[in-house]
Amino acid sequence: MAQVADAVKAQNMELPGGRVDEGARELTVRTMGRIVEPAQFNNLVVASRGTYSVKLSDVGYAEDGAEEPRTEARLNGLPAVTLVVSKQSGQNTVAIADAVKERLKEITSTLPPGFKTEVVGDQSVFIKASIEAIQTHLIEGSILAAIVVFVFLWSFRSTVIAGLAIPTSLIATSG
């Protein structure tokens, strides 16, 4: 394999061939060693055994084809292309996810018929749900705290004062 690779490298390159002076102009000459057709690779000499030149066609063959797949992505049993977007440290995950989703909407209109984009995993969903749960718990907690203040103090005035302080803390923490 190493001899074949070396032969392909050595016999398939363009090298400087010198220069030609033409009055005030100087032209560069190069030798064309590039193989144009894939079938021509079969005629490359990869080794010599005595008087016999071993060609690539003696040990294998070259063809123009697709590269052997090494990985595969499928979504719901159909071929797919995956793209993983990761945020940089210190950036807002929700803002990044929202920006990516907006960009995907723009890209979707340019896709060929039958192609679509789909978000498979999104950490911002969990973050938004957590923030919503915290806000709900703060509201429920403030209502319960007001009830406890009223039950223990039997003072509507103290309950109102405590109730006014609680929404201020909600505004400060939910921003």
Image (spheres, grey):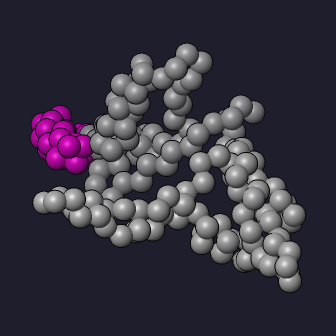
Residue 73 lies, with reference to residue 24, above or below; the image says above
Q: Nearer the viewer, residue 27 or 168?
A: 27
Q: Nearer the viewer, residue 93 or 71?
A: 71
Residue 16 lies, with reference to residue 23, above or below; the image says below
Q: Nearer the viewer, residue 41 or 16?
A: 16
Which image quadrant for residue 61?
A: bottom right
Whether residue 97 is visible, yes or no, is: yes
Is 107 within the magenta?
A: no
The magenta-colored residue range is 147-175
Q: Residue at x 85, y 79 (%)?
A: 51
- Residue at far bottom of view: 50
- Residue at far top of view: 113
The quarter in which the C terminus is drawn is top left
Q: Residue at x 76, y 56 (%)?
A: 42
Q: Residue at x 86, y 75 (%)?
A: 52
Whether residue 153 is visible, yes or no, is: no
The quarter in which the N terminus is drawn is bottom right
Q: In x, y percent, where is residue 56?
A: 79, 63
Magenta segment's dominant SS is helix
Q: Is residue 162 left or right of residue 2?
A: left
Q: Nearer the viewer, residue 105 or 139?
A: 105
Q: Residue at x 51, y 35 (%)?
A: 119
Is 149 within the magenta?
A: yes
Q: How many marks?
A: 0
Q: In x, y percent, where is residue 58?
A: 87, 64
Q: Is residue 66 left or right of residue 86?
A: right
Q: In x, y percent, where is residue 103?
A: 35, 32
- Residue at far front of view: 23
Q: In x, y percent, where is residue 99?
A: 32, 37
Q: Is residue 28 left or right of residue 170?
A: right
Q: Is residue 35 left or right of residue 14?
A: right
Which image quadrant for residue 161?
A: top left
